[in-house]
Image: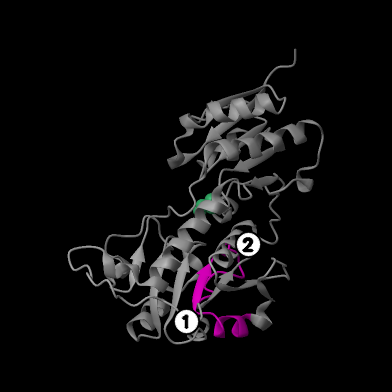
Amino acid sequence: MDRPVRIAVALSSMKSEQWTEPLRAACAQAGVAAQFELWDGRRIDARYAVVWLPPPELFAVETGLRAVFNAGAGVERLLAMPGLPPNLPILRLVDAGMAPKMAEYVCFYIARITRGLDRFGGPDALRDWNADRPRGTPPAVGVLGLGAIGAQIARAAQLFGYRVRGWSRTPKAVDGVESFAGAARLTEFLAGTQILVDALPLTGETRNLLDRTRLSQLPRGAHLINVGRGETIVDEDLLALLDQGHLASAVLDVFRAEPLPAEHRYWHHPRVTVTPHLSGPTPREPAAQQIAAAIAALERGAAASSLAGYVDRSRGY
Ligand code: GLV
């Protein structure tokens, strides 16, 4: 019998020990005998690694890696690691159960905004049976980034009756979603968006994209929900526009520095809701199945670049 394929698991804060069994079971189901080992700094001759913010030594020690699986959607920090071998294929998760949870999170906050749900909680709760209800035209929701996650958010918002528009780097079609593509159409997209949902990956092109100029292109009273990456927003510009009342509120799940430093203004700003990067937790079973399917394909000789989630390093995701 073939020796099991050795796979290093280095998942930082994601509790590596809870992943080995789902990964092993998913590989067995995909027909691959695999041995997953929590990586402790010693060489295990791994053929693959499943990582989330791994120790940089991993790549210097495990020199026989054929591919690395990122146990999340965003790869910007992995790509920025100094010791990452330039030709090592990286595969990231595509949806893997994250997208519906993120769509749920976003739609929850959209409902909170559009129905004024904050009025009804806490010690000062409004106790008025005749409280205003929204009956007018629903606001336009604009989703920045139409990858697996952004597209799911757009579909979910549409299901709840919103007019949905989406912006992406290259043209993307999502049923019923008015689609805008490329830098040349970003101004037009923002100008017609009342609730902006940022679902962008962090790349050279998206870093600091939402600065004062761009955020000012949203109509007065617009809201922002960020589930993409903190670095896509210039914090000082967002705070200034919230202070001036140009923007009505911001719901932020991702930040330039995480954990968000205790002294950051976002924590206490009356128009800002901070959540601790929880909109899209990676569910273990679907993620393990996606990784196992890719390992099985690679073991059968498929090229990494032909698989879903293959990271094009020149694009950054
Ligand atoms: C979470 O932020 C992820 O990239 O999956």
Is 169 situated left or right of 107 in this image? right
Q: Is residue 307 above or below residue 42?
A: below
Q: Amino acid at mark 1?
A: Gly
Secondary structure under badge 1?
loop
The part of the chain drawn in magenta is: 186-211
Marks 1 and 2, the one that precedes in the sequence: 1
> Is residue 202 within the magenta segment?
yes
Residue at image point 71% right, 55% down: 312
Q: How many discs appear?
A: 2
- Residue 106, percent across and down? 48, 62
Residue at image point 48% right, 29% down: 40
- Residue 193, percent across and down? 54, 80
Q: Is residue 51 above or below residue 107?
A: above
- Residue 270, percent across and down? 28, 73
Residue 8 sits in quarter: top right
> Is residue 268 within the magenta segment?
no
Is 182 situated left or right of 224 in this image? right
The colour style of the image is one colour
Q: Is residue 38 visible?
A: no
* Numbered circle sitting on residue 136: 1
Secondary structure under badge 2?
helix
Q: Is residue 190 visible?
A: yes
Is 152 situated left or right of 66 in this image? left
Between 1 and 87, the one nearer to me in the picture: 1
Q: Residues within 10 Å of mark 1 (few under 14, many from 20)?
A: few
Which of the two marks, 1 or 2, is nearer to us in this view? 1
- Residue 296, percent across and down? 73, 32
* Numbered circle sitting on residue 288: none
Quarter of the image with the C terminus is bottom right
Q: Amino acid at mark 2?
A: Ala
Q: Is residue 200 above or below residue 213?
A: above
Q: Which residue is mark 2?
A: 151
